[in-house]
Image (cartoon, rainbow, N blue to C red):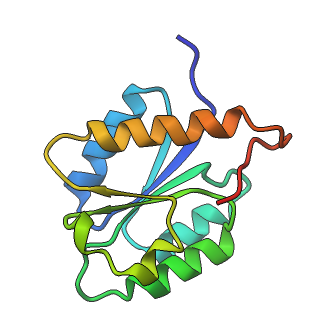
Amino acid sequence: MQVSTKRILIIERNPHVRDFLRRELVERDYLVRGSRHVDEALAVVGSPEPPDLIVFAADTPDIDTVGELQRLSGDCPRTPIILHTYHEDSVDESITSFVTAIVEKSGNPERLLQIVDDLLCRKTNRDDPNGREGR
């Protein structure tokens, strides 16, 4: 099996969830980095090897999710962002303009993994020489 060159950034405050998602994505041959919060993530986004996709957990009550997503999408406007949340059906509409997909957290990561695969596969099939797609 060929190792993927697709890079994924997981922004998740819970280290157990972050490590679980990392293991699941590495098993699918993605290159994965994790961060605890957006400030830490912005360093990765601005690095020479920015992510091709971001998984953003927005279940921290003390953060401004819209503000954090604005910061992320401002620094990487063409990178798909998946919002990973406990309550998919109660996501505020102001958030949806900053994300490519919304996936509810559960004990089974299959839906998240499928959406990651779908988004990164579509990205590699675009005509853009950098393999990037717009939102």
Give the residue at the far left of this rendering: 107
- Left or right of 76 on screen, residue 1: left
In the image, residue 14 lies at what x, y percent? Answer: 23, 63
- Left or right of 110 on screen, residue 127: right
87 vs 64: above or below: above
In the image, residue 72 lies at what x, y percent? Answer: 57, 73
Q: Quadrant of residue 85?
A: bottom left
- Left or right of 111 on screen, residue 51: right
Viewer-nearest residue: 36 or 116: 116
Viewer-nearest residue: 41 or 64: 64
User: Residue sitting at 83 percent across and 43 percent down?
Assistant: 128
81 vs 107: above or below: below
User: Residue sitting at 54 percent across and 42 percent down?
Assistant: 119
In the image, residue 25 lies at what x, y percent? Answer: 39, 36
Q: Count the marks: how many?
A: 0
User: Residue sitting at 67 percent across and 66 percent down?
Assistant: 76
In the image, residue 60 lies at what x, y percent? Answer: 25, 78
- Left or right of 41 on screen, residue 46: right
Viewer-nearest residue: 3 or 53: 53
Pick the quarter of the image with the C terminus: bottom right
User: Residue sitting at 83 percent across and 38 percent down?
Assistant: 127
